[in-house]
Amino acid sequence: MLHDLGSRDKTFIDVTQRMREQLLGIVADRGTHECVLLQGSGTFIVEAMIACFVPRDGKLLVLVNGAYGQRICRIAEVAGRPFSVLEWAENEPVDVVALDQALSADPAITHVTVIHCETTSGILNPIAQIADVVANHCRGLLIDSMSAFGALELDCNALPFDAVVASSNKCLEGVPGMGFCIARREALVKTQGNAQALSLDLYAQWQGFEQNGQWRFTPPVQCLLAFDQALTEFEAEGGVAGRGSRYRENRDRLVNGM
Ligand SMILES: Cc1ncc(COP(=O)(O)O)c(C=O)c1O
């Protein structure tokens, strides 16, 4: 973080490009997905995902079992996107049977959103089953994987989703300041014109990266350089398998100690 680079210099453009590719590697992309980076904390990238992927005439189903699910409802409200809610207690995972029924009952729903791991309680939602149900109903799945991405497997070939978002400062262990969205290219293409905030337009930023490799607005340069190093350390630890196993050991030690 003590280095400075011009954000439009080739060295920095190369860091940005490498980072996008490394992040796609974590979900085992085979050329079907795209990675868009965005300035800001986790909430910024969640907000960008919801407003970009859910069109103004779409409808979002929010699966809520904790504070971050509640926050997505608030985001949908502010963005003016029609939404409905399925809610469980904070100590219960999402029930896929109820999800299946809700999707059968309401054909207006275009997208479903869920928190992968509800950070507030540590509850892990059954993401693979949720993805199957949503895909069976031909709706789009938007995942907030803020506190799971990088420690729990998320293979985009086995698990159909339109978009998944996370940030630099959770399981990938960078410093705060940047979020990223990994999206199915076909779904990302359809987001053109949906954004309602210029700075949270994932389609426009994707096009920017594709055209000249640059960020549209000043990026958090030092945060990115730190994240670049964090990704090197992540790979050295054995990627998702290595990081996840260290976290499980930490968890066991904590639980045993308590
Ligand atoms: C699941 C989840 N979503 C969203 C957020 C919001 O991120 P931030 O506080 O960085 O805006 C967090 C933060 O911990 C989170 O855990």
Image (cartoon, rainbow, N blue to C red):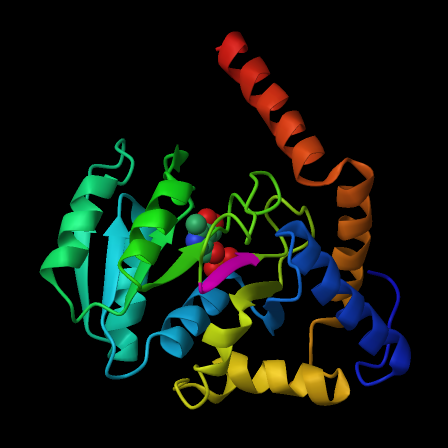
Q: Report the residue at 57% width, 57% height from top.
A: 167
Nearest to the observer: residue 230 or residue 34: 34
Q: Is residue 42 left or right of residue 36?
A: left
User: Residue 47 occupies which quadrant of the picture?
Assistant: bottom left
User: Residue 56 occupies which quadrant of the picture?
Assistant: bottom left
The spot of residue 243 in percent (x, y) is: 67, 34
Q: Report the residue at 76% width, 71% height from top.
A: 16
Q: Report the residue at 35% width, 42% height from top.
A: 129
Q: Split into 4 quadrants, where in the image is the N terminus?
A: bottom right
Nearest to the observer: residue 185 or residue 126: 185
> Does residue 67 show up?
yes
> Does residue 215 show up?
no
Q: Which residues are magenta?
A: 162-166
Q: Report the residue at 44% width, 82% height from top.
A: 190
The spot of residue 23 in percent (x, y) is: 68, 58
Total numbered circles:
0
